Image: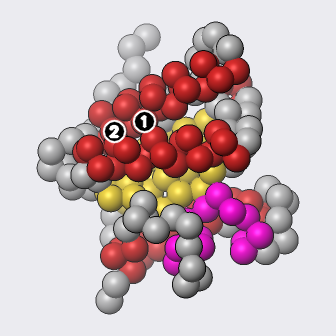
Amino acid sequence: MARTKRILFTKAAYHICVRGNNRQAVLNSTEDKLALLNTLSKYKERFRFKLFGFVLMDNHAHLVIETTNQISISKIMQAVTLSYSQKFRNKYGYVGYVWQGRFKSKVIEGDNYILECLNYIHNNPLRANMVSNLKQYKWSSYHKYNESSNPLEGIIDIDVIKP
């Protein structure tokens, strides 16, 4: 049975989730997480999309991305996941699918919902009992929104919360 086509919008915000194949850890180390962030940064510059937020867990990642009129979310995610997959396979000598199926996407409608979505993804490490305080989890855009000093300068677009 053929899978249903994605409904694509121009200049839309999406909540994206990509998961490791068979729920395996695909963001095993600091190096792996930095590789995915660098890949996102590279394609963000190339495709001119906005990245409002993210959380990188060991076996999956959540992203909040707004597309432009020039490029679809499918093209963005194809480039990001393929590029990271190649790096992962080379590093670990892995054969096969790195990501489980197609990425999941949900269109975000309205400013209130985008803030709820950011709150949801930022709280992932708490729900997974990985930390007791969000400040303890390094691999999230939470820090960009809640702290003055940040190592993620430039990758996150925080204009979504401007009044």
Residue 121 bears which disc, if any? Answer: none
Q: Marks 1 and 2: in contact by CB < 8 Å?
A: yes
The amino acid pointed to by label 2 is: Ile
Find the magenta span and give its range: 134-146
Residue 12 to residue 59: above or below? below
Task: Identify the residue position indicated by label 2 in the image.
Answer: 76
Q: Please give left or right for residue 65 compared with residue 59 in the image.
A: left
Which secondary structure lies at badge 2? Answer: helix
Residue 80 bears which disc, if any? Answer: 1
Residue 84 to residue 108: above or below? above
In the rendered picture of this protein, how many numbered marks are placed on residues? 2
User: Where is the C terminus found, in terms of image quarters?
Assistant: bottom left
Where is residue 25 shown, x and y percent of the image? 73, 34
Residue depicted at x 63% and y 50%? 56
Is 30 or 120 nearer to us in this picture? 30
Residue depicted at x 15% and y 49%? 69
Where is residue 119 shown, x and y percent of the image? 57, 70
Q: Please give left or right for residue 6 compared with residue 59 in the image.
A: left
Report the predominant secondary structure element of the magenta stretch.
helix
Q: Splitting the image into 4 quarters, where does residue 21 fall?
A: top right
Q: CA distance from mark 2 to mark 1?
A: 6 Å
